[in-house]
Image: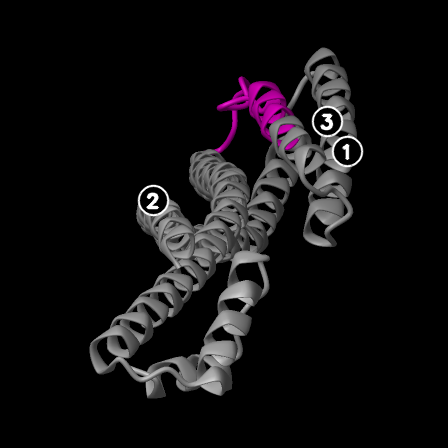
Amino acid sequence: MNELKKELETRRAAMDTKATDYRVKRDDWNSKTREFQQERNSLNSAVRELIQEVKKQRTIRDAENQRVRDMKVIRDECNKKVRDAKRMIEGEQPDSEKRKQRNNRKQIEGLKRELNRLEREIDEGKHRGKKEGEAMKRAKTLTQEIRAHVPVKIKVEATPEAQTAYDGAIEEQEKAHQDVTEAASQAQAAHELMLEWNSEVDARRAKAEEAHKVLRSTKKEADRAHHKYIVALRCLHSINNIFKTMQSERKDKVTSSEPQLSVDNLMGKLLSGETLTTDELMQLQSMD
């Protein structure tokens, strides 16, 4: 019996050490789990805020693109007024000036055709992502080139009425060009910012997903350590119950072969590494 007691004391000390070790590991893993949970939640919160910013910039871009389309209608009307005003004084120009104007018109018409085609493709969504930015930059360059070819005034003698009509049409045309350019610039700025926020959303979302994976891993480790801790506590409880039963039997000085055999059998199972069932634990407790 003394040898059994020594063996149980050794097993109890070892199991107590294991229980303490598993408890410390469990607490450490739980601490890491909380850290990664906070990191994941923070990243997810940032992602939600960035998504709202993306939506905001998309709304601004779409509104500015609509304004570009509206301003183009006004610009076309202004261009018609310029053409009408030019017709009023074209007959008064010398041949050299007419040739110069015709060449200038041809260059402008070529640039306008390319600009109209490019703007139509942008409106139809044929340019996506990086290509859309390049297309909008090209459209801006074409607009600048067109403006550079448009003379402020026709340098010929004209009637005051014709000159006034032409000057007024040129002024309206210039303002319409500026409005279109400004709206296009605002749309491009909003689009670029939207793409920038989109990239940030992807980056933050990837970090959040990685933090969630680590979180799941640390939680599994914490659950595993907790399970081993509970098993160690149950083993300690079983050993303590065996000690209580042995002490009770010595005090009562009543020896029963059947109960003692039961205690020995349960102790043997415990020392061999087997897990005691709930009924067996209750049997040990009933012997207390």
- Camera-near label (3 vs 2) is 2
Residue extending furthest toward the left? 251
Mark with earlier residue (1, 3): 3
- The residue that mark 2 highlights is 17
> In the image, residue 164 lies at what x, y percent?
42, 38
Mark with earlier residue (1, 2): 2
> Quick one: 272 or 40, which is closer to the camera?
272
Going by the image, does 215 lie left or right of 31? Answer: right
Q: What stretch is highlighted in magenta?
A: 139-159
> In the image, residue 189 lies at what x, y percent?
46, 37
- Camera-near label (1 vs 2) is 2
The CA distance from mark 3 to mark 2 is 94 Å
Q: What element carries label 1?
A: helix
Q: Which mark is residue 83?
A: none
Q: Badge 3: how crowded within 10 Å, few (<14), some, or many (20+)?
A: some
Is the C-beta separation of discs 1 and 2 under 8 Å?
no
Going by the image, does 6 lie left or right of 271? Answer: left
> Vertically, is 74 above or below 148?
below
Q: Badge 2: how crowded within 10 Å, few (<14), some, or many (20+)?
A: few
Identify the amino acid type marked 2. Thr
- Camera-near label (1 vs 3) is 1
Is residue 88 at all visible to an observer of this figure? yes
Q: What element carries label 3?
A: helix
- The residue that mark 1 highlights is 114
Q: Residue at x 31, y 84 (%)?
A: 254
Quadrant that contains the C terminus = bottom left
- The residue that mark 3 highlights is 105
> In the image, residue 276 lies at what x, y percent?
52, 73
